[in-house]
Image: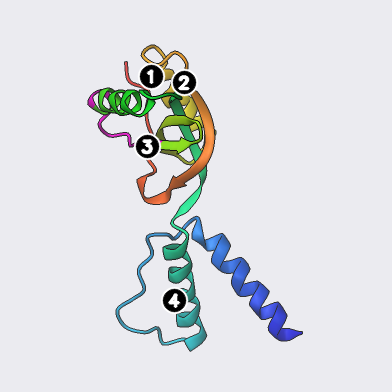
């Protein structure tokens, strides 16, 4: 029974810490404490390498199907990257549509703020829940 509780505790700790310590690097020298702490840190690092994404939000600015859809998506991405070079853009395909989603926002509020910035150029854009790259998350501020 104690092993099950300990395993559940380790799993809970590794999942909850994931959101806050993705960039954590283990110290070059081992800690002077319990060796189990070092094992837990290694387990945490392995988990983060296996699952480098977290739940977040992106803004979808393009969705189209057809023979020309990929070329249109790439052209839209190029234009977007010219205007907003600090914001990543991702083309995905889910039959039958090509989609262009932009940004890696941790909260819906961050995504909504950036949507306000781009909505004149991309009138049909909307915020969508997606898995985002934790290392690429940025906070956008409204620019005039």
**First to last magenta residue range:** 82-91
Q: Position of residue 123 (x, y in %)?
A: 44, 13
Q: Residues within 10 Å of mark 4 (few under 14, many from 20)?
A: some
- Mark 2 surroundings within 10 Å by alpha-carbon count, few (fewer than 14), some (14 through 19), many (20 or more): many
According to the picture, the residue beneath numbered tag 2 turns out to be 125
Between discs 3 and 4, the one toward the N terminus: 4
The answer to whether residue 50 is above or below residue 30 is: above
Give the residue drawn at x 47%, y 16%.
124
Asked if labels 2 and 3 touch by Cβ distance under 8 angstroms, the answer is: no
Q: Quadrant of residue 45?
A: bottom left
In this rendering, the label closer to the viewer, 1 or 3: 3
Q: Is residue 114 visible?
A: yes
Along the viewing direction, whichever of 3 and 31 lies nearer the viewer: 3
Whether label 1 touches label 2, CB < 8 Å: yes
Circle 3 residue: 90
Q: Residue at x 52, y 62 (%)?
A: 17
Whether residue 34 is visible to the viewer of this picture, yes or no, is no
- Tag 4's secondary structure? helix
């Amino acid at each position: 029974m104690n092993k099950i509780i300990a395993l559940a505790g380790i799993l809970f700790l590794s999942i909850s810490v994931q959101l806050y310590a993705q960039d954590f690097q283990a110290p070059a020298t081992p800690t002077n404490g319990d060796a189990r702490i070092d094992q837990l840190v290694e387990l945490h690092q392995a988990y983060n390498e296996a699952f480098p994404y977290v739940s977040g939000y992106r803004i979808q600015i393009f969705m189209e199907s057809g023979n020309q859809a990929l070329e249109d998506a790439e052209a839209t991405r190029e234009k977007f990257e010219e205007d907003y070079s600090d914001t990543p853009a991702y083309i995905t395909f889910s039959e039958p549509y090509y989609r262009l989603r932009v940004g890696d926002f941790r909260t819906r509020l961050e995504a909504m703020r950036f949507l306000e910035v781009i909505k004149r150029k991309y009138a049909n854009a909307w915020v969508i829940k997606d898995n985002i790259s934790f290392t690429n998350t940025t906070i956008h501020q409204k620019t005039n």
